[in-house]
Image (tube, rainbow, N blue to C red):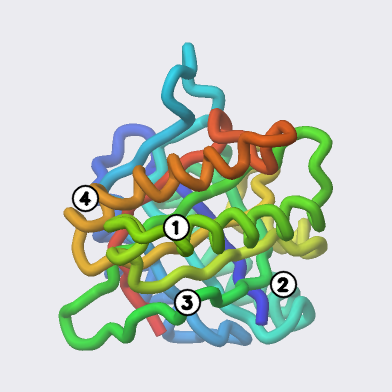
């Protein structure tokens, strides 16, 4: 299983609410009308965010994201076939230009690792999701990053603390090579490469906003020895509500 993750922001002059309305009620139905080879399509509507690390003299990463798209595929071949299909190029792509600030879009292909199954969602109840985009520290290899990230998370979970008890699910998305041409469907280019995206689930916005910062501080402390496996100053966090399109 592969997940294409795209963090986008609204076009200049557009409000956050207008962006979300078009994304959910116009763009989503266009995609649902012809899913092509997409197994699952989820929109994560951002309601809050944080950037960088305490003590940074200035933000070192470009910020301001309104949503994160998740497209799930069974293979790279099905991803490529979807992005090259005339429906993607002639319908979905042109509509994206109506709300997506294409030059600032950030997309990456990942392989998800489920560390704790996400909670089931039903009816009007939508999971609260925290998406933590981690920037790999200079000199750290992808394999070393993955191993140290997993170990640091497990050390945090071993603690008896409210930040651990509040967590309802956790999926680590590790960057996968390939599909660079398909990723350009969302725009962007030239942004720093993010080695992974952590998706953490909570019962409510208050729970997420209260406990994730504490979790992230504990993770950062375990990253610090030997130079750290990720760079907090170039990483960012998005708090969101999940909307399943299909």
Label placed on residue 17: 4
Q: Nearer the viewer, mark 2 or mark 4?
A: 4
Q: Nearer the viewer, residue 50 or 100?
A: 50
Residue under numbered circle 2: 84
**What is the x, y in percent for residue 170?**
46, 69
Q: Quadrant of the C terminus?
A: bottom left
- Determine whether the residue tagged by mark 4 lies in a helix, strand or loop: helix
Label placed on residue 231: none
Q: Nearer the viewer, mark 2 or mark 3?
A: 3
Residues tagged 1 and 4 counted as in contact (Cβ below 8 A)? no
Task: Categorize mark 2 by other alpha carbons within 10 Å: few (<14), some (14-19), many (20+).
Answer: some
Residue under numbered circle 1: 68
Judge left or right: residue 230 versus residue 62: right
Residues tagged 1 and 3 counted as in contact (Cβ below 8 A)? no
Q: Marks 1 and 3, how far apart in space?
A: 21 Å
38 to 71, vertically: above or below? below
Task: Categorize mark 4 by other alpha carbons within 10 Å: few (<14), some (14-19), many (20+).
Answer: few
Whether residue 190 is visible to the viewer of this picture, yes or no, is no
Residue at 18% across, 86% down: 123
**What is the x, y in percent for residue 26?**
32, 68
Residue at 42% across, 58% down: 159
Q: Marks 1 and 4, how far apart in space?
A: 15 Å
127 to 99, vertically: above or below? below
224 to 132, vertically: above or below? above
**What is the x, y in percent for residue 181?**
77, 58
- Determine whether the residue tagged by mark 2 lies in a helix, strand or loop: helix
Q: Nearer the viewer, residue 129 or 29?
A: 129
Residue under numbered circle 3: 116
Judge left or right: residue 185 versus residue 67: right
């Amino acid at each position: 299983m592969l997940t294409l993750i795209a963090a986008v922001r609204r076009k200049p002059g557009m409000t956050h609410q207008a962006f979300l309305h078009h994304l959910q009620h116009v763009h989503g139905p266009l995609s649902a009308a012809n899913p092509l080879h997409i197994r699952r399509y989820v929109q994560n509507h951002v309601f809050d965010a944080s950037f960088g690390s305490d003590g940074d003299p200035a933000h070192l990463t470009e910020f301001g994201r309104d949503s994160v798209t998740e497209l799930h595929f069974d293979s790279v071949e099905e991803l490529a076939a979807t992005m090259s299909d005339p429906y993607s190029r002639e319908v979905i792509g042109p509509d994206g230009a109506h709300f997506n600030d294409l030059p600032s879009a950030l997309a990456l292909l990942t392989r998800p690792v489920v560390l704790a199954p996400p909670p089931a969602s039903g009816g009007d109840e939508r999971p609260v999701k925290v998406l933590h985009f981690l920037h790999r520290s200079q000199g750290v290899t992808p394999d070393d990053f993955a191993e140290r990230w997993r170990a640091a998370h497990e050390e945090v979970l071993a603690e008896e603390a409210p930040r651990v008890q509040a967590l309802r699910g956790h999926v680590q998305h590790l960057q996968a090579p390939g599909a660079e041409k398909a990723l350009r469907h969302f725009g962007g280019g030239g942004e720093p490469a993010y080695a992974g995206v952590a998706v953490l689930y909570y019962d409510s916005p208050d729970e997420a906003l209260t406990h994730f910062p504490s979790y992230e501080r504990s993770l950062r402390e375990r990253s610090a020895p030997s130079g750290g496996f990720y760079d907090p100053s170039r990483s960012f966090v998005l708090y969101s509500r999940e909307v399943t399109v299909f």
